[in-house]
Amino acid sequence: MKRKQDKSRQPATAGPLTRRDFLKGAGVAVSSGLLATPAAATGAPESSAAVVGPGETPVTLRINGKSHTLNLEPRVTLLDACRNHLDITGAKRVCDRPTCGACTMILDGKPVYSCTVLAIEAEGHAVTTIEGLAPEGHLHPLMSAFVDNDAQQCGFCTPGF
């Protein structure tokens, strides 16, 4: 059985250029124009940062008021630099993602999860750990609040502070 073709569904010939050909050509024209546009015209900032790595690079960190120069790979986090290279172990790696707060350090007066901050990003910034909150033999108000309220440090959420 042969089907009868519905002539009303046949496209009318509109010339040598079809809608599909037009859309293909427009897509090519737009994409080639974007690819050829310089970064300055698009508003994208030009990078002036020096590329470091993949090997070790010297990094100077100011932690608890003292300057430390280390040779670190660019992938080393601030937490790993403190714990593994400087023996500053108050902050802990617990969740290995920024959720629990056990790795909290203070970077330029603001708390950060040190497991997500690269050591090279902390260069030139003031870093304070739990060991640097108060001078030896004295308690920081935060530490006093723990004592006054019988707070327990369970090792999950508070060792960074």
Image (spheres, rainbow, N blue to C red):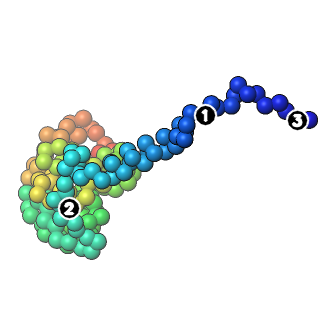
Mark 3 vs mark 2, foreground winner is: 3
Q: What amino acid does circle 3 point to?
A: Lys
Count of residue discs? 3
Mark 2 or mark 1: whose residue is earlier in sequence: 1
Q: Quadrant of the N terminus?
A: top right
Q: CA distance from mark 3 to mark 1?
A: 25 Å
SS at badge 3:
loop
Relative to residue 142, is residue 101 drawn left or right? right
Mark 3 or mark 1: whose residue is earlier in sequence: 3
Q: CA distance from mark 2 to mark 1?
A: 65 Å
Mark 3 vs mark 1, foreground winner is: 1
Relative to residue 7, is residue 113 drawn left or right? left
Q: Residue at x 27, y 60 (%)?
A: 77
Cβ–Cβ under 8 Å for marks 3 and 2: no
How far across and how far down the image is residue 116, in percent? 30, 53
Label 2 crowding class (10 Å Cα cut-off): few <14, some 14-19, many 20+? many
Q: Look at mark 2 in the image and give the residue it sits on.
A: 120
| Residue reaching furthest to the top | 8
